[in-house]
Structure formats: structure tokens, C-alpha cells
Amino acid sequence: MDLVNGIVSALSISNLFYCFLGCLLGTFVGVLPGLSPSSTLSILLPITAYLNPTGSMIMLAGLYYGAMYGGSTTSIMVNIPGEPASVVTCIDGFQMTRQGRGGQALWIAAIGSFMAGTVGCIGIGLIGPGLAKYALEFGPPEYCGILLFSFTMIISLAGTSTVKGLVAGVLGIFLATVGLDPLTGTPRLNFGSLGLMKGFDLVPVLVGLFGIGEILHSAGAGQAKIFEGKLGRMMPRGKDLKMGLLASLRGSLLGFVVGLLPGMGPVMSSFLSYDLEKRISRYPKKFGTGVIEGVAGPEAANNATAQAGFIPMMCFGIPIGPALAVIMAAMMIHGLQPGPLLFTKNKDFVWTLIGSMYIGNVMLLFLNLPLVGLWARISLIPYKILGPLILAICVIGAYSPRNTLFDVWVALGFGGLGYIMRKRNWPLAPLILGFILGDLFEKYLRQSLSMSSGSLLIFFSRPISLAFIVVTAIVSIIMFRVLKGVPQEVRSEEEKF
């Protein structure tokens, strides 16, 4: 019944508009190799402060999972992934285009993405409310345990160097301490600057790192050349259709499970799906020559992971990647605190958002199939035109939350930092994760210690917090071992994302 009410609410004119706008922007972002969901979400973050909370979250969510759809278009037609998660799609997708089967590749990618999105929506509706019933048992120690577990993502988001990821994460936590002490109001690390008295505002930091930093890094991006052959018929037939749909189903289920795990983002799930399809195939040696399962599985997997990532983000405040971290930040700006209480305190919002995801998946199906030629040509916009336009939006976005030039300088400063980190192959995701979670962790840690008169035993005497501490230790050990065996190219693409 809650889901039905949510869908009905999402069908209002305003919510439909926000959903369509998010899906349209997401497809656009997915098509353009020079933009990523995290950078675009950061650029739009200031604008959402002037919109109603439900509409703005519907738009941001549509942009995020819409980018997963759009990334396949240029992967298949141009052999350039619009998103890091679509890297695997290039392998067989472009080969199908060269064989005159590009239409079939695009069709199965869109259908697979739709199936994955539907699986993700159903999963959110089934799992989320079940977690909400434990909300009353969560106090500061439990939230502290959850946030401690969230920090394990720093390891998996570290990219090619775990050490660099840990250093970046610690830097983010350090930057979160600048400003006023959350309990006593004492100034900290402001060096006499009035601008730093309130600390670094989240919006200019995100706009700088993900928006301006990526613009600087992508300034020299070249143009691609679209394959000018025929796409052929759109819908696969016979054996190709059967194998493509089965691969989409397997990818959807695999991607959904992966999306529930911290740090296992869409890039990783697409590689795992491709590996699975190759291992179970009767003709593994043909992979890389235009096999339809090599397109269907990974595309479904990365979309399912993107949808499933909303579960840990909304239920526990654990974002599986930088894009969801930005969406979580947007929710917090609107006073919507991610966590177990979200499903009880903001029930109407949650179910409207879930309902909009069902509608958004249908919208994306129609956006990606009929307009494929248009999206492919948009990818050729010169960056000398696109870059300055996005930069202007970034500056306005940094200024607008507090109407101060100080925040513009903060955004430019963090933009320079983001550019240097990209050039030196330092991951951005751990830094922003540490910055967002660091302040919350300090608050709940100090509240917990106040409750116990400074004793750490409070974390071990409460079952839920103890369980999160144990799981954190186990997951950290496993992730350290697993990531040692992950191919370098997979971790590099995950780091870009």
C-alpha cells in the first residue's frame, strides 16, 4: 500500500517534471565522457536548496541512475565509455556496431538497464522497511558503530593505492574539524579567519573537488568520431534475444547484491558480471568479438548496483560511492537525515522517491532508444565550449548557499586540490567520504562518551554497536585481501568513478 501511495504521489505534475529532468540530465551526463554523475550532482547541489526536498531528491536520483543508462550509448557507438561503469560495454558493444548490430546492442543495453532498475526498486521496497523497525534501538553508540563501518569504504575506494586512499580519508576527516566544536562551540583551526569560523561549507567543497577539479582535468579532452555505419535492426531475435535477456537477469541479480556491499560500486559489478558471463558461456573465446551477453550482463549489473546503493545510503547513511555521497549530502541539507529513522520520520518522502524510480526507469527506456543518434552527436560538443559554461555554473553554485565570496575561493581552492589529486592519481572519493562522515562520527562518538562518562565499554556493551565493530574488523581484513587480487585496470576505473 505504501508503494502504491508513493507511485501516486510521484505521478503529480511537479514530481513527474523533476523525474523527467533528472533522467534527461542523467542521460546527457552519461553520454558526455567529460562529465561524471558526482561532479554534476555537486554542481546542481546549490540549486536544490531552492527546490522542495522531495522534488530535488527525485531529480538527483534520476540523474544518478540515468547516467548509468546513458553511458552505454557512446560505449557502443563511439567506443568511448560515457561513464567508468560502461568501460566493459566497449569490449563487445563496439564490435557489434562494427558488424552492423549496433541497434541490437543498444536495445539490449536499454532493456537490461530497465530490468536492473526494476529489480533495484523492488529490492528497496522490500528491504528498506524491514530495517526501519529497528530504528528505536539506535542511539549515539549504534550510529557511531554504523559510521565506523562506513569508513571501511575508504579502503575499497582507494583505487590503485590503499595508502593514498587512507591518507585522503584522514585529510577529509581533518578538514571536517575546521570551525566550531560541535558540543562546546569553541573555535578550532580557523587561524583567526572569520570565514573559517563556521568551517568549510559542504557545497563549495563538493563543487570544487568534483566540478571545478574535473573541468580542469578534462580541459584537454579531444573529440571522438562516431562510427558511420548502419545500426541495423534494433531488437535482437532468436538465440541472441534469449541469451541477452538471461544475461540481463543474471547481471541484475548480481549487481543488486554487489550494490548492498560497501565500496563495491557499479564499475566493479560490471567487471564481475562480464567475468561471470564469460565463465558460464559455451563459447568464452568469442567474448570480445561482439557477443551480446558481454553487453547485456555488465549494463544490467551497473544499473542494478546504482539502484541498490540507495538501500545502505538511506537506511544506514552509508553511500557506496561519491555520487551517492553527494545525494546523501543533499538530503542532509534539506534536514532529511539518512539512517534507520528515515523510513519512519519521513515515510511519505521515502515512498515517493521509490515510486519515482519505477517511473524514471520507464522514462529512461524511451529516452535511450528513440534518441540514440542525438545522444551520440551531443558527445562531440567541444570542451572549449562546454567547460567554461560548467565553470560559470560552479562559481554561481559555490556563492549561492551563504552569499559570500569566501565560499567561491574555497571552491576554487578545492578545485585546484582536486585537479592535483587527479594528476597524481590520488582518489577523491575517500577524501569526500571522510569530510562528510567525519563530523557526524565525532558528534556521535562524543555523545556516546558523555553517556558513559568517558568509558569506551559502552560500544562493547550494546549488541548493535558491538556487531558493527566486529563486522567492520572482518570486512576490513577481507577487503584488504580481496583488493590485492583485483586487476589494476579495474581499480583504476573504480578510482575515476
Image: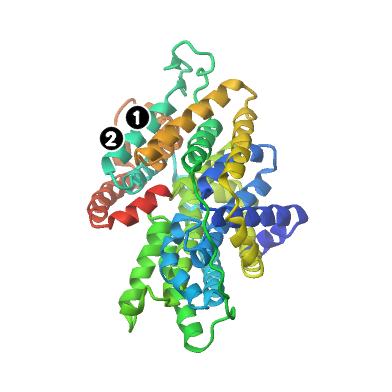
Q: Residue furthest top?
A: 192
Residue 428 position within the rendered picture, expressed as x and y whole percent measured from the top left? 41, 40
Residue 150 against residue 281 in the figure, above or below: above
Residue 366 against residue 157 in the figure, above or below: below
Q: Amino acid at mark 1?
A: Ser
Question: Does dot 1 land on a helix, a strand or a loop?
Answer: loop
Q: Does the rendering let one see residue 130?
A: no
Residue at 35% in and 39% down: 426
Mark 1 vs mark 2, CA separation in Å = 8 Å
Q: Nearer the viewer, residue 218 or 193?
A: 218
Give the residue pinned by disc 2: 457
Q: Residue furthest right?
A: 13
Q: Nearer the viewer, residue 352 or 249?
A: 249
Residue 259, picture quadrant: bottom left
Residue 285 position within the rendered picture, expressed as x and y whole percent measured from the top left? 31, 78
Pointer 1 local density, CA inside 10 Å: few below 14, some 14–19, many at least 20? few
Callout count: 2
The answer to whether 424 appears left or right of 398 in the picture is left
Q: Nearer the viewer, residue 22 or 212?
A: 212
Pointer 2 local density, CA inside 10 Å: few below 14, some 14–19, many at least 20? few
Evaluate if marks 1 and 2 touch, with contact meaning CB atoms under 8 Å apart: yes
Question: Does dot 2 land on a helix, a strand or a loop?
Answer: loop
Q: Nearer the viewer, residue 23 or 359?
A: 23
Residue at 37% in and 69% down: 274
Residue 232 against residue 325 in the figure, above or below: below
Q: Amino acid at mark 2?
A: Leu
Residue 338 position within the rendered picture, expressed as x and y whole percent measured from the top left? 52, 44
Residue at 44% in and 47% down: 318
Residue 214 position within the rendered picture, expressed as x and y whole percent measured from the top left? 49, 41
Give the residue pinned by disc 1: 452
Q: Does the rendering let one see residue 166?
A: yes
Which of marks 2 and 1 precedes in the sequence? Answer: 1
